[in-house]
Image (cartoon, rainbow, N blue to C red):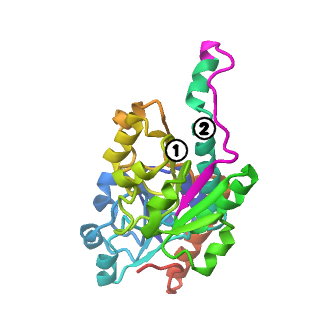
Amino acid sequence: MRILFCGDTFPAARSYLARRLEPANDELVVCKEDRIADALDGVNVVIPLMCRIDSSLMDAGSFQLIQQWGAGIEGVDLRAAQQRGIRVANVPATGSNADSVAEHAILLTIALLRNFPAALANVKAGRLGAPLGHMLASRTVCLYGLGATAAAIARRLRAFNVRLIGITRDPSDPKVAEFNLDACYSSNDRNAALAHTDVLILCSRLSDETRGIIDAEALQALRPGAYLVNAARGALIDYGALCSALTSGHLAGAGLDVFWKEPIAPGDPLLGLPNVIATPHVAGVTDRSYEEIADAVAANIERLRRGETPLNCAA
């Protein structure tokens, strides 16, 4: 099998997968994002790393499987893949991946509340006893979207003695009880939930319905001085509305692990704001998460080798 990593980001993924392949029968290839079409010769499996796989790339190659390294498949033209008989599979955001993202979301939350960038600057300046931080305990945290990652976050947040609320399409769904929420609101009633929110953590998948769900109206509905944490997908948030809410002070801060175009430009004005903490899409990049993802990807490569249908197919 010839397996192509589309893009040279997320470098640890290659070594984790390589250890699970057959050296005599498999070849792992890496190309730049803008050179995918040139690298498709003889490729059986395409692994997109934050790259768009559209109909033109599908026509440029003869690969049989588009295998996502993780859960999100919004970068793949599913209809085009179905029309061409190309399988599209992902790795569900469960297990260690959900746990890893949950830990990172809480890291961003606490870093915002304790003004961690200012604390680091004060160490270098020799200044003690500042900045004044805020406790997480007793605050209301809202999980927007109730999936595996939100469940992992909810379990951990209980130890911080927070008031936990959620927003989901159907609050009456039996699964909601598993989150042990203090309150749950429907997506249509999101502003009522946001009015009670001190920390908003986005856990939704990106789709046509969720793109830009955190718009100016949603941000204005948040309590003044609230915080926003996003380790899901950048396009869930309206960029301009976020910048306005941060510069006006209505939003006290934002912790972002994902962006609208990745990587985000180093000179993006958002990164220059003192109330923004940004990390380079690493919430799910941990040893245990990658072990499980690599196992799932390798298993699908083996299934393809045997002529079997890959698991977790979206197309």
Three-letter code, disc 1:
Tyr
Return the residue at label 2. Answer: 113
- The quadrant holding residue 107 is top right
The segment highlighted magenta reads 124-144
Earlier sequence position, callout 1 versus callout 2: 2
Three-letter code, disc 2:
Leu
Q: Does residue 308 appear to the left or right of 156 in the view shown?
A: left
Q: Does residue 159 appear to the left or right of 37 in the view shown?
A: right
Residue at left offset 47%, top offset 79%: 313
Residue at left offset 56%, top offset 70%: 92
- The quadrant holding residue 115 is top right
**Disc 2 secondary structure class:** helix
The quadrant of the picture occupied by the C terminus is bottom left
The answer to whether 171 is drawn above or below residue 220 in the figure is below
Q: Nearer the viewer, residue 109 or 296?
A: 109
- The quadrant holding residue 2 is bottom left
Residue at left offset 56%, top offset 48%: 198
Q: CA distance from mark 1 to mark 2?
A: 8 Å
Q: Indicate yes or no whether the magenta region holds residue 140.
A: yes
